[in-house]
Each structure stands twice: as structure tokens, then as C-alpha cells.
Amino acid sequence: MKFIEGGICAAKGFKASGTYCGIKKPKTDNQNPNIKHKNDICLFTSDVICNAAAVYTKNKVKGAPLIVTKNNLEKSSGTAIAVIANSKNANTCNADGEEKAAEMCRLVAEELKIAPEHVIVASTGVIGQILPIEPIQKAVPELVKELDYGKNLEAATAIMTTDTVKKEYAVEFEIDGILCRLGGMAKGSGMIHPNMATTLNFITTDCAVSKELLQKALSEIVKVTYNCLSIDGDTSTNDMVSLMANGLAGNNEITEEDKNYETFKSALYEVMANLTRMLAKDGEGASKLLECICEGAPDKDTAITVAKSVVCSSLFKAAMFGEDANWGRVLCAVGYADAEFDIHKVSVDLKSEKGIISVCRNGAGIEFSEEEASVVLSADEIYILIHLNQGEESATAWGCDLTYDYVKINGDYRT
């Protein structure tokens, strides 16, 4: 398996476009023709119909685009051709939300001459503000006209809100000697908590996979990637991940849980895990990526629960911002994790590119150098290594430190 460039356009037959349509008025002077605005809407399509799968937020309040997308995939029996997504307005908690989301699908379908149910729609941004449809009506013909196999960057930047960097990842792999590609893009910086799907995520592949196994693979990998990510403990209303497979690589369709299915799942994990890591590192106001690895667990669910408990701890996140080796906060978070294990067998180490320090053995603190700890925690990527010493299972969770800037960003996010 090898990393490649291209994001959602890495797989054969996928093309994309993005533009600024004016969904949100810029803070700068609108009359200045020299001002270049960031893209706020994108479109990507497949040359042929795709098998499609999706996972949605568990928040009881769901954005209108999620409801429309779910209905479309049910109507189309799990197939799709195009995805349209906008940033800066979530189209959520609006009386006309579903009508606007459905209209976005209709506009795309009309230009591409496809059925509206073959369009996936997504939105992200401020909740509770009416989505203006007029800018989108004007933008769709341009988006269709500008579709190209190399415009993944235009699409990836169009879904950014408070993100500071675009997030893309793609790999190539072989199925029975045939080269396949799988790539994705994601957005997310705040309002992120492991309660699927976490942010907006779009994944494409030219590998042929049945609808049933596509959904099964996506749901399984979500559990150990996006659902193991937390920035601030808030589960968004618009979280969604979609996966489209057009089969243009030419492999025999994967219809059984055999070695080919496992290879496909490995590629999907590689892309989704790396996107998850990028999302964590770009958390709102973040200065450090936190990666918690829990090993020696009696079962996978216990490992996941413990790792997530640590990266979700506000106290521990604040300690990492202060570069304070307050390991007691790690053990505290391990202790209130909703899982069964013997806390008296737990060990904890803190690691970075600048070294490693052992801070806990058998559930109790051990002596360590505060000076060495300060050096280790001065890095911008910190690994929290937890060993339960009670089994063979392991899991990883991702998060970031809690900084002053997080409050600044969210104090006036809407205004």
C-alpha cells in the first residue's frame, strides 16, 4: 500500500470543482475586485454510477442535508453519482432546510442530467441561519462546467470553516494484481466528538465492492477512526461520512469477507486514520496533537473506551497545553472510563520526538525528572502510552490540547 496524491480525485473516474459563491458575505469590502475569496461550495462526480455508503451523526438534531442524503440513498438503493457540499452555513434547524437541501440536489441533477436521488448533499457552518439558495443556483452551472480530474484541491478547500489547512489523503493497493485507488477529504476543527460521524468526510474508490460490504467496512472503520476523535466534546448536527465505489479499477467485485475484502478495509483504514489524525492536529486553537494508544486490553471495546476517555479529558488537555506532566489526570480519566479492568495493573508513559518518560507503573506514580518531562512535552505531537497489562487488544484515540485560542475562536464564532 502506497500513499499517493489526489485526494478524492485519486481514484479513476472522479472529478471535482470548487468556487466561491457568496453564501457568507466576507468581512472585507465587497466592492474591492482584488479581494480573493475562499471557496465555499464544491462538487465532485463519478463518470459512472457508484455503490455508496454513509454514516451519520447520532445527534438528535440532524442537519437537513443529512436527512435528504439518507432519503436519496434509500430511494436509489444505495447508489450515487455526485456530491455537492457547502461551507459557512449548516442549513440546520431551519423550517425550509430540507426543501433547500433537496433543491441543491435537483440543481446538480438537472445540470448533469441524472436523477436527484443520485446526489449526496452536505453542509457545514453556522447552525440556525437560513441558507440562501440564490448563490447556489448561480454556482451549480459553473461547478459542473469546471469539473476536472485534477481539481481535488478546489473541493477540499471549499468545505473548510475554521480549519487552518485542507485535509486530504489517498493510497493505492492491489486486488488480485489489479491496481486500485482510494482517497478522501475531510473538514473539521471544532464541534468534534466521537459519536459518529465527526465532521464532513468524503471518500472515493475505483475498487469494485458490493453495497453491503461497502457499508459494513465503512461502519467498522468509523468505529476505530473517526469515532476515536475528540476536539471539544461537542457532537455536531451535520456530521457525515460518505463512501463511493465506482469499480473502474476493473477488479472482480468484492462480495465476500475474504482476503480481498481485508485488503480493501486496510486501505480504507489507512485513509480514514490519517484524515482523523489531521482533524485532531487542526483542532480549534490547538498547539499539540495528542495520540493516546491503549494496549494490553482484554477486548477491543475496552481499549477504545480507555483511549477515548483520556483524549476527552479537559483537565488533561489543559495540562498538555501547559506542558505539565500531570500524569494523575491520565489515570483519573482511565479510572472513570466505562469499562471493566484492574486499575492496579496499569502503566503510563508520555512520549514525543524528544524522548519518553515513564510516569506510572501498577496504577501508582513513579519518580521521573520534571526537567526531562518538560522537554518531552515541548513537542507539538504527544503520545500517551497506556498499557492495561490484561490482554492483547489495542486501540488509538486522537485529540488536541485545550488552549486560550479555543475560547477566542468560539466566543464570537457566529458574529
Image (cartoon, rainbow, N blue to C red):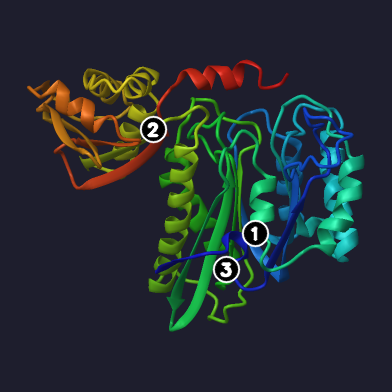
Which residue is outermost to the left? 367
On screen, residue 270 above or below 232: below
Marks 2, 3: nearer the viewer: 2
**Residue 19 seen in the current view:** yes
The residue labelled by disc 3 is 210
The residue labelled by disc 2 is 288
* Cα separation between marks 1 and 2: 27 Å
Q: Earlier in the sequence, mark 1 or mark 2?
A: 1
On screen, residue 33 above or below 270: above
**Please, what is the three-letter code of the amino acid marked with disc 3?**
Ser
The residue labelled by disc 1 is 152
Point out the image quarter for the C terminus.
top right
* Cα separation between marks 1 and 3: 25 Å
Which residue is outermost to the bottom? 177
Q: Residue at x 68, y 69 (%)?
A: 149
Q: Secondary structure at mark 1?
A: helix
Q: Earlier in the sequence, mark 1 or mark 3?
A: 1
> Quarter of the image holding residue 126?
top right
**Please, what is the three-letter code of the amino acid marked with disc 2?**
Lys
**Residue 145 at x, y = what percent?**
84, 63
Left or right side of 140 for 313: left
